[in-house]
Amino acid sequence: MKNKINRRKFLNTALKLVTIPSALSLQNCGGSGGGGNGNNNPSTSDITNPPKFAKNLLIPKLLTGTSFNLNIKSSTHSFFDGINTNTYSIDDGSGQMSYLGPTLKLRKGATVNIQYTNNLSINTTMHNHGMHLPSNIDGGVHNVIAPSNSFTANWMVNQKSCTNWYHSHLMGATAEQVYRGLAGMTILEDSESDALDLPKTYGVDDIPLIIQDKVFAADGSLDYSPSHMEHMRGYLGDMFLVNGVITPKLSVEPKQIRLRILNASNARVYNFSLGGKSFTQIATDNAFLANGVNMTSLKLSPAERAEIVIDLTSNFNQSVVLKDLSSGAEIMKINVDKVLTTTKTTMPSVLTTTLTKFAFDTNTPTRKFTLAKNRGRTGLFTINGVSMSKAVINQRVPLNRIEIWEVVNAMPMVHNFHIHATHFWIIERNGSSANVPANEQGYKDTVRVDANSSVKFVVKMVDYTNNTIPYMFHCHILEHEDRGMMGQFTVE
Ligand code: C2O
Ligand code: CU
Ligand code: CU
């Protein structure tokens, strides 16, 4: 397959990142998870793909409360039996997280204090993606945490219940740091989510799914070695992981199950399905949808989240497989093989009545963002013709002003667009509101922008101003972000 030669070359020169028990014999037959289409070929792992649906899904440790002390550190994680792969993880001191970070459960109205200490030997940052907080504690490229240093985000949670996440945002190195494990989920709750009859027991019927694709070298190490082509198109793996487990299985009871799906992949756009079984999407990135949307497939680009509910009440002793229709990959099997011991839920017909779609008209001020590639030899990506510079504020946005932001993807490949600070509401795709599907009509902070297409959304910056410390907007295909497809805005 393509890229094999690059990979061999890489393996010969790479740091050996893992220790392999000598008795283990490894074959060199590549992965088999991909099966992708022509323009979507993943890089190929050099280690045998483990049997599908053999390992149990790991559930990241849940932390609740208002004060969190997290260590960002080097770890080893067992992706393959008998192999300790070098990773990064975020841990609360218990030593339980060897890849990714614990799930943080925060409550609206609470003043929370999250301290991250960098125990790596390299710089990092930790961004609270989806969180509405002041720019000076946003954890973006300006909040660098040097080795042995700490960074604290302290603010009052003031937004609707949703599923967010946190991840490294180090300028130029986000892709590799997230790839090696610097990401975790955040769950926000409020009185609205309390009142809904939805599955809420973490790890039992309310399941976090942090979905990623990876490439592994023959020795089981995480292979992050994008070629020029892979920087351009984004780095795709041939093995699919959920919460750090390759194609896992999950046992559940015959009842409604809530999945909090986070696409934490560097570059892959998924089109999830459950083998034709219908499900209900209940939440977008930053809030519940007004009403559940019945679906049989769900597209998620990197950093997007969706909460879905599957009704498995009448599926006892059956299973469903979570697939990606775009690549054909099977990702996880859900076995309905547990005896019912917890309470069943009934899908509420109304999820929230308090979503605000800001009023706009033809006089609403519009900003345009054109995503493109630099014409020069640099191979850099641009937004409005310029690549990210920490020293440049690209946009200054007045507080409390309703604006339309138009994102134009001028390239024949998919990108997406994420903004820090707050959520937005998509109002048009390709010039028409009719092109916005029902499951995108809610609070979003990241939107897929298909090849040669455009998206318009309405947004209002509220609460926090800072004329000098900016927030970021960017493509969340991490190779693109690292290669300049990012800019900065202040709220003034
Ligand atoms: Cu998920 Cu600017 O970040
Ligand atoms: Cu973000
Ligand atoms: Cu992009």
Image: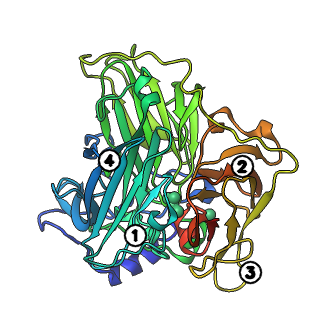
Above or below, 406 against 235 in this view is above
Q: Earlier in the sequence, mark 3 or mark 1?
A: 1
Marks 4 and 1, Cα distance to the nearest angstrom? 18 Å
Write the residue at 42% across / 20% down: 197
Which of 13/401 is in front? 401
Q: Which mark is residue 485?
A: none
Q: Earlier in the sequence, mark 1 or mark 2?
A: 1
Which of 22/216 is in front? 216
Query: As drawn, which residue projects farthest toward the top?
Result: 314
Residue beneath disc 2? 457
Marks 3 and 4, Cα distance to the nearest angstrom? 42 Å
- Please, what is the three-letter code of the amino acid marked with disc 2? Phe
Residue beneath disc 1? 125
Q: Earlier in the sequence, mark 3 or mark 4?
A: 4
Write the residue at 56% across / 77% down: 228
Residue beneath disc 4? 103
Q: Earlier in the sequence, mark 2 or mark 3?
A: 3
**CB of residue at label 2: within 8 Å of ligand 2?**
no
Q: Residues within 10 Å of mark 1 (few under 14, many from 20)?
A: many
Kindly indicate whether the residue at mark 1 contacts the one at mark 4 (C-beta within 8 angstroms): no
- Please, what is the three-letter code of the amino acid marked with disc 3? Arg
- Would you identify the image quadrant in which residue 77 lies? bottom left
Marks 3 and 1, Cα distance to the nearest angstrom? 31 Å
**CB of residue at label 4: within 8 Å of ligand 1?**
no
Which element carries disc 3, helix, strand or loop?
Answer: loop
Marks 1 and 2, Cα distance to the nearest angstrom? 28 Å
Which of 129/461 is in front? 461
Residue beneath disc 3? 375
Above or below, 155 against 324 in this view is below
Which element carries disc 4, helix, strand or loop?
Answer: strand
